[in-house]
Amino acid sequence: MIYTEFSFPNDSHIIWSLMIVTYPFISGIMAGAFSIAALYFVFGMENLKPVSRFSLLVSFSFLVCATLPLLNHLGHPERALNVIIMPNHRSAIGGFGYIYNIFLVILALTLWFSYREDVIRAAEAAGGLKKKILTFMLLWNLGKDDDTRDVDRRLVFILTAIGIPSMAVLSGYVGFLFGSLKSNPWWSTPLMPFVFFVSGIMSGLALVLLLYLYLGWYGYLEKSYKCLRTLSALLWFSTALYIILEGVELLYFYYESSDAWFVISTLLLTKLKYSFFVLQLGIGLGVAFILLSAMFALKLEEPSFAKMAAVASIYILFEVWMMRWNIVIGGQLFSKSYVGFRDFHPGWMEKEGILVAIIFTVLPLVVLFMVTRFLGVRPSGDESAQIDNPGVNTDEELP
Amino acid sequence: MKKKRVVKRPKSRREFLKYAASGMAGMLIVTLMPKPSWAQRIHQIEEMKHVPDWMDHYYAYVVDTTKCIGCGACVRACKRENNTPDGYFRTWVERYQITDTGHVYIDSPNGGHESFPPKDVEGNVLKGFFVPKLCNHCRNTPCTQVCPVNASYETPQGVVLVDKEICIGCGYCVQACPYDTRYIDPRTHTADKCTWCYHRITKGLAPACVTVCPTKARIFGDLKEKKSEVREIIESQRVMVLKPELNTEPYCFYIGLDRAVR
Ligand code: SF4
Ligand code: SF4
């Protein structure tokens, strides 16, 4: 039987628009950045020390902004708290409020303990209202003796360790929301949470790497070639893992060749031809992976290594955004009749349009800038009180 | 000898934790409090008590595709009865034309609201038929399963409904329904779908679409009633459901469903 095109009559509207593309992009960066902190604070990856606390800040800035696109998407944002006060425990979104808030609390506390001394310094230097706010944030505890420092260090270790599963759940979770919908063959795969998680890690690593190059250049973070190499290696590794996951997923669809493959192959060869093959896989993933591989294969030295790492990171961020687009929007470009297709062209000024999406994507960076300013993060030379990794640090043994 | 470490815990930090704990306990109490939705539902149930045995039913719907003539009276009746927004459908009718070239032509112009003008197809039509569609009021409902706030729910009579006072308009249920019977109402920004005319059936009337169908292609009834037509059909005839492989357990059954039907 050869079907001519037909969409169900209710299928003429795209319900999950740019906002639902933006949310997983932001939450992915949040997860990736947090994983860098976790690698240092919990697993003792000493090379990552220069970016360890900073990546917590990045993670936090993205986390606090993550819900904005979701709220903007809701038909009734004023009822958003219903998700927390009357959750449906069978719903995949039902647990969102809890998971999000748990991670937010963990991350906020981790930040608090790891930046406490910086805030104390900022509070001491500030005056007036800012001093009052900072002192309040410190809960009037201005102690920075060794014992307090020791407690802070241990708490950061414990909190980050608890944060890892919460972060993994929160970022893989959005993949589960899609993956568990049996109504949509393009989404319905058990690999979806892993694809979202790994690509999130990639985007977080890429953004932190970019920011690190920029801030390291201006002396705000300790410049370390080792740190840059480690970040790039992690980026290469997660990208390779992502390629395997995407590849396996597509291969399965193709080999099973079920009803799903009919719609997926048509989708990929028509509506997503350009955005999936050219933009996401070719330009995004392909170029980034070749650059990352070349950096290591050619044993590049620092200046060229850094430049290529920066370019590769930009491509990775682009790839991850395109992947979000292709999954979220791509999954809605066909009707549930599986034989009808449609287009989606977001407007610039709509409620969920391009401009708002850009604002929501850039906003976390603005928050990051404000938070670093407020916390008094200064050029690395002044960071005498940088928290050491409890897992690695042995030179402070007690007598 | 190891020095005993004395860690001074500032009083303020402890107090902070105390406040945080009470805050969380407060949240928990709010979560466990009776939900407005339930209060509302109980109120509705109380209101309905004057109708004798209005809860003591278990409904099902049968579509006899062999009888549908594609007149669209049901689509029009539904729109009038439920005031559905233009371009959105609680029920619609699809036309299938299968030709000797192996092509399957499907269309549903404006959901079949104005019936079906002739359509040019390639080759000779071997078979042609109409298939009315509506919410299947599934038992294993993906739509109520995914609703984060319980706004989509199933009544004891087997009807799947949306509570518009609670719905946050996330659209998750619309994505989850494999049959595309849900939509977000552009006027209320909440989910909407066929209710089997709940306001009518609880008063002992049939859904509007069933009432107007001139050929009795749409049949509605109570499975608890021994002599009901739907029960008799389901028990004695070969009936089918849409997309059975998805295990949604629809309670809308089809007679004469062709394999071409999507
Ligand atoms: S047909 Fe769709 S909306 Fe109706 S009960 Fe089934 S899944 Fe829910
Ligand atoms: S749109 Fe409304 S009914 Fe549908 S899942 Fe969201 S809250 Fe529930």
Image (spheres, coloured by chain):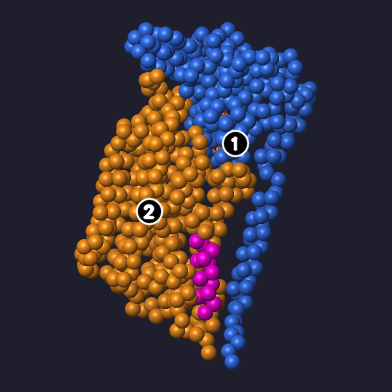
Chain colours: A orange, B blue
**Residues at marks 2 and 1 touching, judged by CB atoms closer than 8 Å:** no
Beta carbon of the mark 1 residue lies under 8 A of ligand 1: yes
Q: Please tell me the numbered disc located at residue B144.
A: 1
Q: Please tell me the numbered disc located at residue B157.
A: none
Residue A296, position as x, y percentages in the image? 26, 62
Can residue A127 be seen in the rendering of this structure? no
**For the residue marked with disc 2, what is the amino acid?**
Leu
State the quadrant of the N terminus of chain A: top left
Asked which quadrant contains residue B105, the reply is top left
The one nearer the camera, B129 or A110, is B129
Q: Is residue A62 left or right of residue B172?
A: left
The chain holding disc 2 is A
Residue A5, position as x, y percentages in the image? 37, 22
The residue wearing badge 2 is: A241
Can residue A77 be seen in the rendering of this structure? yes
- Queried whether the magenta region covers residue A41, the answer comes back as no
Which residues, given as a range, are shown in magenta? A150-164
The relative height of residue B138 versus residue A90 in the rendered view (above or below) is: above
2 and 1 marks on the same chain: no
Instruction: Look at the magenta stretch and give its main secondary structure.
Output: helix
**For the residue marked with disc 1, what is the amino acid?**
Thr
Q: Quadrant of ligand 1?
A: top right
